[in-house]
Amino acid sequence: MAQLKKLPGFTQSRIRNFDRLKAALSHLSDKLVLPEACPNSIPSWFGFLITCNKGVERNKLVRHLEQKGIQTRMLFAGNLIKHPCFDKLRESGKGYRVVGELTNTDRIMNDTFWIGVYPGMTDEMIDYMAETIAQAIK
């Protein structure tokens, strides 16, 4: 119950951190797909989802960020039928069906990752993340 009193502040911090990071990375929109809020929504962002465009290797970028002390996480989504839990189903050919080529799910699986925007982050931390991403892409 005590944490609920902090919720409005946490929500505002997440929104502020997200907006600051997005503004700082907006000049890289040809290299990265940046997250967008749905129309008429005001999300309290859990994290900042980044998808790398052609010419930017996600794994290389993630390694660079981790080496610079910026934690990343892979998105548990994308082409789930390539997840090990589907191994037996793939072998048997039963248990699920595929419609189409799943091009977008493969792209998400291969090119997307998260970085945080949690409420405890300072402007300096957000700026450091943006600068480090920009340096890695150059």
Image (tube, grey):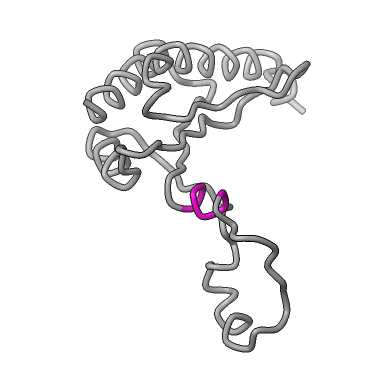
Q: Within the magenta stretch, is there residue 21?
A: no
Of 51 and 20, the residue lying toward us: 51
Q: Which quadrant holds residue 130?
A: top left
Lateral position of residue 38 relative to residue 112, left or right:
right
How many discs mark residues in the rendered view?
0
Specify start and end residues of the magenta stretch as a single range: 104-109
Pinpoint residue 95: horizontal percent, then vertical percent.
73, 79
At 74% from the left and 24% from the top, the residue drawn is 4
Q: Residue furthest front?
A: 100
Lateral position of residue 116 relative to residue 11, left or right:
left
- Can you say whether 10 is above or below 74 in the image? above
Quadrant including the N terminus? top right
- Can you say whether 99 is above or below 54 in the image? below
Of 128 and 61, the residue lying toward us: 61
Pinpoint residue 71: horizontal percent, then vertical percent.
37, 38
Quadrant including the C terminus? top left
At 57% from the left and 59% from the top, the residue drawn is 79
- Can you say whether 11 is above or below 47 in the image? above
Pinpoint residue 49: horizontal percent, then vertical percent.
51, 34
Of 80 and 19, the residue lying toward us: 80
At 63% from the left and 12% from the top, the residue drawn is 12
Q: Which quadrant holds residue 69?
A: top left
Magenta stretch, overall SS: helix
